[in-house]
């Protein structure tokens, strides 16, 4: 047996054991790592607000705490408001289900000249409901445990966001102290770009959510749909902070509520949601995001799909600001070259010359001056 074989076998076993240990630790720490990633991007987003409050003489820790506290309070208020509306609407639908069902059947018969007759009592039976409740009663404990776990995770994200926002400059100086001066400038510039893009993304999304809320509120108020302010706020928030498909997911709730009033109202809501999505994509969004998150729609869609596949809902939220930050960093430090004159003469893309003639054109002029072909 060669002398190196036992050492190679021991090294291979150690590498396999290290891989298994790392995989086991990563699976156990997935929730912690995702919470840290979310907290880091939230800290980047609230950094401008913390800086403004600090510039006015407020301690950075207090400013970070106030800004971090405003975010969950606003989200909790929104959920409580929408949850109360949704609970009341669901209870109203359940109580008036036979009337709604009769009106829908009557509308179908009048519109399509049919003769349908279905007893709604067969669809909603007390024995079926009792059996369903008894069957799923054991899942109440699991649901409560999931709610407690979600609250603990939100608290963990809040604490990490507060720590990142409070000690962000100190952490940046510590990281820069580990690098040579030439690298420190790039690290600080990357941090500034990340703050600008993330904060710009949140600002533009918030402004578009406000515009969407106002537009959908006017539409729902004109149709006479109940709970129009809450439904419009739901559409505005969900449509902007769940990219690409958020508008259609958010529009399902007002369509359901409008359907209980008149089935044609649900059709009009669907038409308005689709039309507003086109106006937002081609008129509103390019103007608001041209200076904050200037990325191509195809790149944004691909980044959202990739982020969702990798990190789930977390990737959906952070994909666009992360890609925008990477693109801005590459635009600033990446190398660009002018297109040769031969490509322009052959009908190639008409790129603008930023630094005068291209190197190939300069070389040709120099050769002509010296009388060479």
Image (cartoon, rainbow, N blue to C red):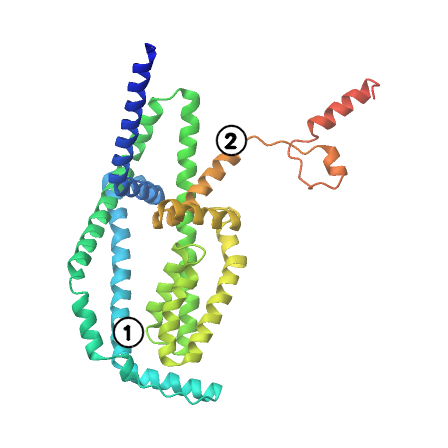
Q: Earlier in the sequence, mark 1 or mark 2?
A: 1
Q: Is residue 174 left or right of residue 245?
A: left
Q: Position of residue 54 (x, y in %)?
A: 29, 40
Q: Is residue 287 left or right of residue 66?
A: right
Question: Badge 2: few (under 14), some or many (20 or more) residues near its Cα, within 10 Å?
Answer: few
Q: Secondary structure at mark 1?
A: helix
Residue sticking out furthest to the top: 3
Rendered view: 14 above or below 202:
above
Residue sticking out furthest to the front: 1
Residue 56 lies in quadrant = top left
Q: Secondary structure at mark 2?
A: helix
Q: Can residue 59 be seen at all in this image of the molecule?
A: no
Q: Quadrant of the N terminus?
A: top left
Residue at image coords 25%, 35%: 25
Rendered view: 114 above or below 298:
below
Q: Position of residue 155 (x, y in %)?
A: 21, 47
Residue 96 lies in quadrant = bottom left
Residue at image coords 28%, 32%: 20
Q: Can residue 164 be seen at all in this image of the molecule?
A: yes
Q: Quadrant of the C terminus?
A: top right
Residue at image coords 53%, 48%: 296
Q: Position of residue 61 (x, y in %)?
A: 23, 39
Question: Badge 1: few (under 14), some or many (20 or more) residues near its Cα, within 10 Å?
Answer: some
Residue matched to label 1: 89
Which is more toward the observer, 107 or 134?
134
Look at discs 1 and 2 and give the one toward the viewer.
Answer: 1
Q: Position of residue 368 (x, y in %)?
A: 81, 22
Are the two marked residues, 1 and 2, in contact with CB atoms closer than 8 angstroms? no
Residue matched to label 2: 333
């Amino acid at each position: 047996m060669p002398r190196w074989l036992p050492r190679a076998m021991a090294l291979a076993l150690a590498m396999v054991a290290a891989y298994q240990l790392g995989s086991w630790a990563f699976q156990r720490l997935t929730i912690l790592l995702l919470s840290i990633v979310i907290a880091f991007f939230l800290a980047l987003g609230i950094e401008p607000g913390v800086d403004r409050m600090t510039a006015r003489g407020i301690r950075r820790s207090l400013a970070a705490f106030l800004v971090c506290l405003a975010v969950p309070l606003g989200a909790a208020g929104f959920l409580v408001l929408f949850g109360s509306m949704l609970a009341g609407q669901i209870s109203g639908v359940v109580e008036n289900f036979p009337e709604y069902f009769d009106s829908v059947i009557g509308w179908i018969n009048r519109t399509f000249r049919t003769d349908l007759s279905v007893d709604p009592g067969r669809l909603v039976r007390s024995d079926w409901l009792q059996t369903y409740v008894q069957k799923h009663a054991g899942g109440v404990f699991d649901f409560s445990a999931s709610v407690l776990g979600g609250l603990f995770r939100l608290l963990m994200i809040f604490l990490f966001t507060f720590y990142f926002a409070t000690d962000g400059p100190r952490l940046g100086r510590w990281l820069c102290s580990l690098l040579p001066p030439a690298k420190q400038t790039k690290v600080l510039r990357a941090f500034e770009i990340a703050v600008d893009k993330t904060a710009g993304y949140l600002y533009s999304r918030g402004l578009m959510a406000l515009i969407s809320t106002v537009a959908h509120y006017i539409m729902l108020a004109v149709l006479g749909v109940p709970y129009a302010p809450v439904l419009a706020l739901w559409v505005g928030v969900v449509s902007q902070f769940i990219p690409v498909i958020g508008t259609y997911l958010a529009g399902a709730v007002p369509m359901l509520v409008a359907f209980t009033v008149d089935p044609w109202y649900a059709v009009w809501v669907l038409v308005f949601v689709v039309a507003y999505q086109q106006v937002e994509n081609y008129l509103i969004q390019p103007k608001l995001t041209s200076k904050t998150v200037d990325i191509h729609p195809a790149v944004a869609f691909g980044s959202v799909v990739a982020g969702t596949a990798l990190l789930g809902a977390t990737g959906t939220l952070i994909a666009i600001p992360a890609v925008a930050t990477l693109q801005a960093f590459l635009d600033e430090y990446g190398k660009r070259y002018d297109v040769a004159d031969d490509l322009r003469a052959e009908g190639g893309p008409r790129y603008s010359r930023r630094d005068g003639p291209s190197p190939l054109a300069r070389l040709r002029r120099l050769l002509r001056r010296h009388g060479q072909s």
